[in-house]
C-alpha cells in the first residue's frame, strides 16, 4: 500500500487548525483523540490473545521473545523488553528489543536504516534466532522493510512471527503467522505516529509481555512475585508483596524475605505452607514456579 494512502498519514479533520488553537483547545482535542485508542485496541483482542498464547508457549520451551522495529516502534519494543527484567525477574536474553540501525539510534534517529529488509534478517541472525523463539515485528505504517525482513526470516526458520501494525490490511500482516492490526486513524499532528499509534503499540506490548509472564508463573494473584529487589524501593516493595500475599505483619515479612535469600516467591511459599527455604524452593521447582500451585490453591 502506498504510504500516502495509509490512515496514519491522513490529515485529521478535527485538528486542521492546530496551529491557531488555544492551549485548552489543543489539549482537549488531543485527549479526545487519545480516548479512541483503547477502543481500537479492544477490537484486536482476538489476535492479541493468540499472540500471548504463542509467546507463552515459546517461553515454556525455553525460547525468547524479540521485538523488532524502527523509529518509535523500535524504541517501544526496547522499552518493553528492558522493563521485563526488573518487573518479572527475567533474564536480559528472554525478552529483547532490536531496532533498525542498532541501539545507538534509540536516542539519535537513523531513519534510513529501516529501508533495508536484509538488516532485519541480519539482526535476528546475529542473535541466533531459533524455531523456539517468537518475533514481534512492530510498524505503525505496517510496511517497514526492516520489519518485513525480520518476520520473513523468523518464518523461514520456524520461529513464531507476529506483526503489530496501526493500519488495516497492513503489508507486514502478510508476513506474519499472527497479525495484530490496531487502526487508530489520522494523528493529531499529521503523520506523527509517536502519538496515537505509539500509544496503541505500547498498550499491546504491555499485554503481550505481561500476559506471557503471567502464563509462566511470574505472577501470584496480581502481585509481582518475581520482582528483583535491586534497590531500596524494590526491597520495600518486595516486603509489602509478601505481606499482601500472606497477610503477615511487616516484621514477619522482612524476616522471611531475608531467610528466603531475598526471593519473594520463596518467602511467600515458606509462610503460606509453613516450610523451610529449601522445601519452598523444591516445591516451586516442582510446580514450574507457580506460587498458586506450590501452595496447593490451584
Image (spheres, helix red, strand yellow):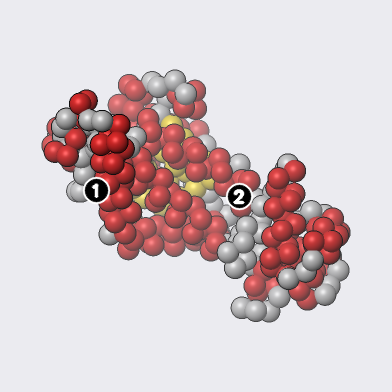
State which quarter of the image contains the N terminus: top left
- The disc, 2 or 1, on the residue closer to the chain's N-terminal end is 2
Q: Quadrant of residue 199?
A: top left
Q: Label 1: how many residues lie within 10 Å, few (<14), some (14-19) or many (20+)? A: many
Q: Position of residue 138 (x, y in %)?
A: 36, 41
* In the displayed structure image, the side of residue 86 where residue 133 appears, left or right: left
Snapshot quadrant of residue 188: top left
Q: Position of residue 29 (x, y in %)?
A: 25, 41
- The vertical placement of 87 against 297, above or below, is above
**Marks 2 & 1, CB-CB < 8 Å contact:** no
Rendered position, 298 above or below 97? below
* Residue 183, label in figure: 1
Q: Nearer the viewer, residue 36 or 107?
A: 36
Q: On the rendered structure, is 3 left or right of 258?
A: left
Kindly identify the residue that appears in the image at 72 percent across and 55 percent down: 238
Report the side of 102 relative to 44 (left or right): right
Residue 97's x, y, as percent? Answer: 49, 38
Please indicate, yes or no, whether residue 233 appears anywhere in the rendered image.
yes
Q: Residue at the location (26% across, 30% down)?
A: 22
Q: Which residue is mark 2?
A: 87
> Can I make out residue 217 in this image?
no
**In percent of the image, x 36 and y 50: which residue is there?**
162
Q: Which element carries disc 2, helix, strand or loop?
A: helix
Image position, residue 63 (x, y; %)? 54, 52
In the displayed structure image, the side of residue 142 where residue 270 appears, left or right: right
Residue at (49, 59) in percent of width and height: 211
Examine the image and state in which quarter residue 73 appears.
top left
Q: In whole angstroms, how far apart are the C-alphas of marks 2 and 1?
A: 29 Å
Amino acid at each position: 500500500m502506498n504510504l500516502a494512502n495509509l490512515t496514519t498519514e491522513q490529515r485529521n479533520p478535527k485538528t486542521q487548525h492546530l496551529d491557531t488553537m488555544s492551549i485548552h483547545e489543543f489539549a482537549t482535542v488531543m485527549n479526545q483523540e487519545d480516548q479512541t485508542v483503547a477502543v481500537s485496541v479492544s477490537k484486536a483482542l482476538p489476535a492479541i490473545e493468540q499472540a500471548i498464547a504463542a509467546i507463552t508457549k515459546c517461553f515454556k520451551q525455553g525460547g525468547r521473545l524479540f521485538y523488532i522495529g524502527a523509529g518509535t516502534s523500535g524504541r517501544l519494543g526496547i522499552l518493553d523488553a528492558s522493563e521485563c527484567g526488573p518487573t518479572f525477574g527475567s533474564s536480559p536474553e528472554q525478552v529483547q528489543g532490536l531496532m533498525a540501525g542498532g541501539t545507538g539510534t534509540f536516542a539519535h534517529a537513523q531513519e534510513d536504516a529501516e529501508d533495508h529488509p536484509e538488516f532485519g534478517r541480519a539482526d535476528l541472525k546475529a542473535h541466533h534466532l531459533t524455531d523456539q523463539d517468537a518475533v514481534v515485528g512492530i510498524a505503525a505504517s505496517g510496511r517497514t522493510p526492516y520489519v518485513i525482513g525480520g518476520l520473513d526470516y523468523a518464518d523461514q526458520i520456524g520461529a513464531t512471527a507476529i506483526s503489530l501494525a496501526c493500519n488495516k490490511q497492513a503489508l507486514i500482516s502478510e508476513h506474519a503467522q499472527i497479525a495484530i492490526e490496531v487502526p487508530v486513524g489520522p494523528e493529531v499532528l499529521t503523520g506523527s505516529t509517536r502519538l496515537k499509534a505509539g500509544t496503541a503499540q505500547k498498550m499491546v506490548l504491555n499485554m503481550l509481555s505481561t500476559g506471557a509472564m503471567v502464563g509462566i508463573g511470574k505472577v501470584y494473584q496480581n502481585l509481582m512475585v518475581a520482582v528483583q529487589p535491586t534497590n531500596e524501593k524494590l526491597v520495600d516493595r518486595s516486603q509489602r508483596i509478601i505481606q499482601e500475599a500472606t497477610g503477615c505483619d511487616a516484621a514477619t515479612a522482612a524476616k522471611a524475605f531475608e531467610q528466603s535469600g531475598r526471593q519473594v516467591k520463596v518467602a511467600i511459599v515458606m509462610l503460606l505452607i509453613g516450610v523451610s527455604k529449601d522445601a519452598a524452593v523444591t516445591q516451586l521447582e516442582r510446580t514450574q514456579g507457580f506460587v498458586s500451585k506450590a501452595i496447593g490453591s490451584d
